[in-house]
Image (cartoon, coloured by chain):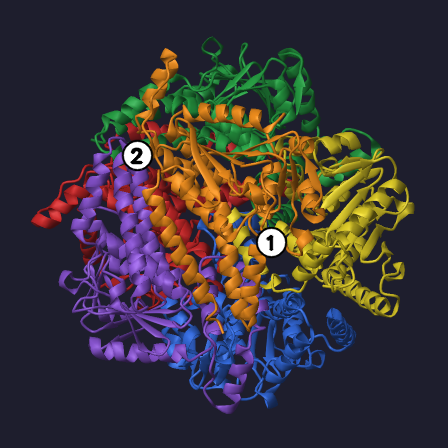
Chain colours: A yellow, B green, C orange, D blue, E red, F purple
Amino acid sequence: MCSNIRPFLLVNNNKRVLEKIMRRYSSSTGSAQYETLAVSVPKKYVYHVELNRPAKLNTFTPAMWKELSTCFSTLSETPECRVIVLSGQGKHFTGGIDLNGFIENASKAHELSDVARKARFLSYLIKEYQDGITALENCVKPVLAVVHNACVGAGVDLITAADIRYCTEEAWFQVKEVDVGLAADVGTLQRLPKVIGSASIARELCFTARKVPSKEALDIGLVSKVFSDKDSAIKEVLEVAQTIASKSPVAVQVTKQSLVYSQSRPTCEGLEHIRLLNMTMLQSDDLSKAAISQATKTEAEFDDL
Amino acid sequence: MCSNIRPFLLVNNNKRVLEKIMRRYSSSTGSAQYETLAVSVPKKYVYHVELNRPAKLNTFTPAMWKELSTCFSTLSETPECRVIVLSGQGKHFTGGIDLNGFIENASKAHELSDVARKARFLSYLIKEYQDGITALENCVKPVLAVVHNACVGAGVDLITAADIRYCTEEAWFQVKEVDVGLAADVGTLQRLPKVIGSASIARELCFTARKVPSKEALDIGLVSKVFSDKDSAIKEVLEVAQTIASKSPVAVQVTKQSLVYSQSRPTCEGLEHIRLLNMTMLQSDDLSKAAISQATKTEAEFDDL
Amino acid sequence: MCSNIRPFLLVNNNKRVLEKIMRRYSSSTGSAQYETLAVSVPKKYVYHVELNRPAKLNTFTPAMWKELSTCFSTLSETPECRVIVLSGQGKHFTGGIDLNGFIENASKAHELSDVARKARFLSYLIKEYQDGITALENCVKPVLAVVHNACVGAGVDLITAADIRYCTEEAWFQVKEVDVGLAADVGTLQRLPKVIGSASIARELCFTARKVPSKEALDIGLVSKVFSDKDSAIKEVLEVAQTIASKSPVAVQVTKQSLVYSQSRPTCEGLEHIRLLNMTMLQSDDLSKAAISQATKTEAEFDDL
Amino acid sequence: MCSNIRPFLLVNNNKRVLEKIMRRYSSSTGSAQYETLAVSVPKKYVYHVELNRPAKLNTFTPAMWKELSTCFSTLSETPECRVIVLSGQGKHFTGGIDLNGFIENASKAHELSDVARKARFLSYLIKEYQDGITALENCVKPVLAVVHNACVGAGVDLITAADIRYCTEEAWFQVKEVDVGLAADVGTLQRLPKVIGSASIARELCFTARKVPSKEALDIGLVSKVFSDKDSAIKEVLEVAQTIASKSPVAVQVTKQSLVYSQSRPTCEGLEHIRLLNMTMLQSDDLSKAAISQATKTEAEFDDL
Amino acid sequence: MCSNIRPFLLVNNNKRVLEKIMRRYSSSTGSAQYETLAVSVPKKYVYHVELNRPAKLNTFTPAMWKELSTCFSTLSETPECRVIVLSGQGKHFTGGIDLNGFIENASKAHELSDVARKARFLSYLIKEYQDGITALENCVKPVLAVVHNACVGAGVDLITAADIRYCTEEAWFQVKEVDVGLAADVGTLQRLPKVIGSASIARELCFTARKVPSKEALDIGLVSKVFSDKDSAIKEVLEVAQTIASKSPVAVQVTKQSLVYSQSRPTCEGLEHIRLLNMTMLQSDDLSKAAISQATKTEAEFDDL
Amino acid sequence: MCSNIRPFLLVNNNKRVLEKIMRRYSSSTGSAQYETLAVSVPKKYVYHVELNRPAKLNTFTPAMWKELSTCFSTLSETPECRVIVLSGQGKHFTGGIDLNGFIENASKAHELSDVARKARFLSYLIKEYQDGITALENCVKPVLAVVHNACVGAGVDLITAADIRYCTEEAWFQVKEVDVGLAADVGTLQRLPKVIGSASIARELCFTARKVPSKEALDIGLVSKVFSDKDSAIKEVLEVAQTIASKSPVAVQVTKQSLVYSQSRPTCEGLEHIRLLNMTMLQSDDLSKAAISQATKTEAEFDDL
């Protein structure tokens, strides 16, 4: 019977409702909001999102997928947030999916007796997981990921949806999914080849599930820079973030929208898209503010967006 | 008159029919099947396809295009085949298209008196050649190409349709087509820029037809690794193949299907595609087998696919 | 009122008309044709287009966008032109957009009282600028860009629409747009990620507007080669151009058409496109000329295209 | 300043949260759930959604867009719902958008001082409205719309996202948007030409905003059938709904998914999509149940989906 | 185990091989070629394909899907065939899929123990069936379908892939699939809405599986004309076919290629496609022949294509 | 040699230059501007374009293709033009392409000795013709075509690019191209099936080249209305035009842009496109003007666009 789906979703929804209520009355950026994420504002306009299950290697629980979705879509609409840095609490960035949560969901599917009903259930589940990752791409603010130590399975799906990737020397990456008997289905197969630009290497990593050390990650273009350790990485990436945050939010966010839209489309379609955006955005006050700032070598103060 | 096409096709078809009959009664993997290819099974689940005209630099004859098509679509549907290694017999990987065969076909076109009829004939011919190459991409099993010495013209078309490329130190590559007065029309112009990720270099190679040595091939991402010689290359690539073959065929083959589909489409379409695949594939027994294998550190035994 | 647009366009059009008349009666390749570009023919079949406002850092004026459009579409249809080398007169390749011209246009938009009318005006303006850049891509002859010293803002838009990029050691690149308060809207966001193949780096450059020195440009695949200075760069690139110019124009130009068309489309669509092109082009005399040339090791003489 | 957006959204979200809580504890289908919609279950598996602001001509308030979104996405995931009939309470189907709500939102936009910030606000608003309409299309259960008397503006957007349209004799339709100074932006321009199949008529209706009586609506294919009055329309459409509800939910819902996906895509892509769906769905028990039902002329009892 | 697939396919392939051999040595158009189809040449250049299982209501057996594929791809490449008329032997056009054959295949799938392996098997099966239908669309010669009496299920899939549809007065149509527990997966859901142009009616027919009489078929645009009985229908349609066959094969076949390609693509892509076709085809002799024919009011004699 | 192209194009360009100069100094709407078109302004904001070669059945000369392109792109940018009515001077709408002009161009192609060079020449020629037709679609103002008497060949290409079609009782239509030995290549094959919504009828008309009388044109949706004679047709269509012209130009023109863009794209892409347009356009003053106009039942006065 399919009736198993409903209670499951109901419980989830109610929980979500309660979370939302609590969140609204807590401070708007504190970690209190989320069970699996920590959100802070280390610098003006710069938000820091941390995977926050350090005792469990920051593995992805069912709650985490939902919270990623909520967190990044909320930040996308939070005017005072201009750039987001993403890292993990503790030693490891993330060990990938949490097996207990995964088995729990899988067993729910197995209780359904018919292939079509199981498929429908799984389809919704995959969609929910995908939405958690895609929330980074849909977020109009740039997301800078800082990987430290392990970045496994779902972790790779996550960072390939970020805009820029950095890592520490001891970091390593693993497209783990084939080892657990499934094809990666929340983004790596779609985004990794576009991120690193070499289909040859992307396919090798996806087929063999071998570990990629930080140096190779740099060589193949998976990360933009390698830092000696986590502290210095966070420190320097926050500075990059600050630089970006100091620029016109209109300029930065429209840049991201255009880059994401144009990625896998014929150039002419991307050009039409930016034309529609900029016929409006060029009427913004940010242009003259930036022009004056450039001319006078002073810092511009842009309104939030 | 167009009547010249028919006899040509009839002869070909009859020959194909005879080949097919012979093939069914010969051993299912032996070289006896094919005139221009040698197929062997060096390791369980790992098939080795060799271009087999070493006396003629493994150049592409009309028969070879057809046999590539038949061979890779057959292996795609052969359950006990899980990974394919592709190389050439003899010293050279391939010298490209066989000029005699090409001239023969060209002269057939010239016998037709009308431009439209010639164009129709050529259109079918190009389609047949393209299908020979695309068969590697349509094959749901990963194809690992090992290039040794010359890889010229059609050879580059061929390997860019493989999943991963390796080569030996003395290997060299040449997008030769402009030198013989035509634009490459069986895949290089479509796939090379996506394989190496740099439009700048891809265009230079296609416009100048200059030779690319193995070291540069590695630097630009055309190959994933360079080996000292052919023997060690084959040996090590067979080991990579064995590693891939030991994993769940569901996981590996769905991974390939998703990578190929998503390559030049917007990310959201690729995500929908893998969702449709995995709502079924996550119901497979391979998941629990792989989970147990990972937990117990024992090798899983997966059914063929 | 929208009536401000008309006079502006009228004046422009009349000027264009006069330019066109003058151009027709001047020598067909001399710099006399253009106000902002210099066109010469240093070698048979090889055209050299130079940005020609050295006193103003070759910055982009309203006239320059239009002339780029005219120049490259004219060369595309000029049979005796087979390859184009693009560089700047003077020390710098280009300092990007000319602020005076930009402000002049912006103030025209501001005279319009309604957002919708401003948007329409800006939409036409962006389209005109985009067309100036896209003219390089639509030109069926290969365009080789040689960057020396500064290549800022619109300069990056320009060179990413070229086929191959080279630079000198002291060259540097800057995606400047966010610094002046706008998202790049004439091509960089669409083309840069495809040119260099790494989304990670492309986004960093677009968000931070930091300068990229020549060495990094080579490492990330933005340029194919770095030369010690401008003279040797021009000299050697002209030789590459000559090599390309010596080949069949049918082969070279169809190669470009296919590469451009296939760039962001599924492979099967690119294959159909080249099949339609080559069912005609393989009937050309260039094939037999090239075949004889290859066989006899003599230079072929191809007709113009 | 942009800070006006936040309070607005906050208020809305809180309201949504409260609504959700209330909904969960009320009967799952009763009108108590929604402020602007009435949901009932007149027949087993058949849900009836009514626009429920009869005193206000069922005009669209900000709440209604959200509730349409919630209602149809909830019904999409409600297993016991198999078909949905959509009509309006009272005499008129709908008078279109509620001007007070629209002005309220518009004034919020006008409080923002910068064009870019206004545009961002409006973009979110249009998206929210579009999502309310698209929820009918995304709902995997067939939606049968019954139009009675006025169907104006947003009403046409709404019914063109339904699967089948019926109306009463006195019904009339009006693509009203140009009359209020804007281009329709929540679906009519995208869906109407595909629904009626004639671009000629679709454009005339959109440009002139003229009223279309029921008879013409039938002739141009906007509706499938005209009934004498509302009562008989509802009665007979509920019977059609019951017929559909008696069939395999797998068959019916996959049919809708495939029809929606294939609508504006090349046929080959639609065929691949249904192949991926049916490689699973043909494994369902519904097939044998339906086969037995057909053979024995007895009614099949299918599980919910 | 998946090994059940192989023997099945092997047997099929051998059978195909034998069929092919037999076919080559029989008359090239006689019914001897096919088990389930009858092919004749009632008029010069006009081929008549008949579903040929009259004793079984011309239901679709596994063999028929394959033979449709072979027959229409062969006729596409048969120069002397210029137009094809399609009808059924006996009273009924077709009763749809043959249940015995379908159950046989379904039971093969059920022998496989794993969902993923079943899905792979079903995926190949659906593809083979789809290819049988799509062969009509891929055939470059126009296909005119004449429906008489029943046209059920797969029959509708078949005729919507034809170019023009005619029927007799007593004909009726039924999109039967939902009644047998599955979504139509061989073309109706993709093509029917495009054929009749009204999404409203298409969806009603697909959801309710109700019968459509000939008069309604004409009204909704499913057929172009209704004839009083089968004999007069065949007679008059053969005359339409003869008219088409008398025209330039280049003109007619390129017209079909362009119509099929452009159906669901943006107009600009369709225009580029026809431009690539006609830059060749306008060089054909057919133009001057047709011009002379028009000028002199004499019949032109065109070469085969 | 290809040199034949150049003089031809040069002459043309010079002529175009002269035309442009003359045009600027003549009255901006008078027929003096064009050789083959007459442009007048019968009502405020309503422009009337007439094919103006009545002595030659308004057949399409090389000049007419160019002038259509110039005329409609100029009117698209002419603020005071809001709607365009298109008809022919004299009895016939148009007899299609002028054979003399066509033969002249064809003979130019034949002077070229190589297939590839001919193809390039023809490709440019077709493009120029296509651009003449597509100019109607790219024009952001609605185009209402009034067909009287003959509308043959290129005439059908022309009117299918208009927004709405009307005709007189004695009007007839003919997709003539197959009769002159070529596939229609300037728009009919792309647009006709979308205009009339029935693929069945569209293909019949394209394959048989039979004449369609006005009554059938109405029945199949090719025209929206049939008028008794030309005078009353022009009179009443001018009134429709006036109605459209009285509405907000922002509303009307954005409506057209959205309809054209969305025609053959998935609905979600069309919705994103209109969202980008309207996030700007909803900030226009036209909204409040129209709202006041609706509320006060007075005519609004909108600024030009």
- The residue where tag 1 is placed is C99
Report whether mark 2 lies on the same chain as mark 1: no
Q: Amino acid at mark 1?
A: Leu
In the rendered view, would you say F246 is above or below A188? Answer: below
Instruction: Determine the image quadrant of residue D83.
Output: bottom right
Classify 10 Å Cα crowding around label 2: few (below 14), some (14-19), many (20 and above): many
Q: What label sits on residue C119 in the rendered view?
A: none
Q: Are marks 2 and 1 in contact (CB under 8 Å)?
A: no
Q: Amino acid at mark 2?
A: Arg
Q: Position of residue B72 (x, y in %)?
A: 52, 28
In the rendered view, would you say A172 is above or below E88? Answer: above
Q: Position of residue B102 (x, y in %)?
A: 36, 21
- In the figure, is residue E268 to the left or right of D281? left
Numbered circles on residues, count? 2
Q: Nearer the viewer, mark 2 or mark 1?
A: 1
Instruction: Determine the image quadrant of residue A191.
Output: top right
Seen at 69% across and 52% down, the residue is: C179
Q: Does dot 1 land on a helix, a strand or a loop?
A: helix
- The residue where tag 2 is placed is F117
Residue nearest the viewer, comparing D81 with E219: E219
- The chain that hosts pointer 1 is C
Seen at 23% across and 71% down, the residue is: F215
Q: Residue furthest top?
A: B55
Q: Residue furthest front?
A: C55
Seen at 88% across and 58% down, the residue is: A31
Residue nearest the viewer, comparing D225 with C31: C31
Q: Does dot 2 land on a helix, a strand or a loop?
A: helix
Residue nearest the viewer, comparing E47 with B110: B110
Classify 10 Å Cα crowding around label 1: few (below 14), some (14-19), many (20 and above): few
User: Which quarter of the figure is the C terminus of chain A placed in?
Assistant: bottom right
Q: Position of residue A204 (x, y in %)?
A: 67, 30
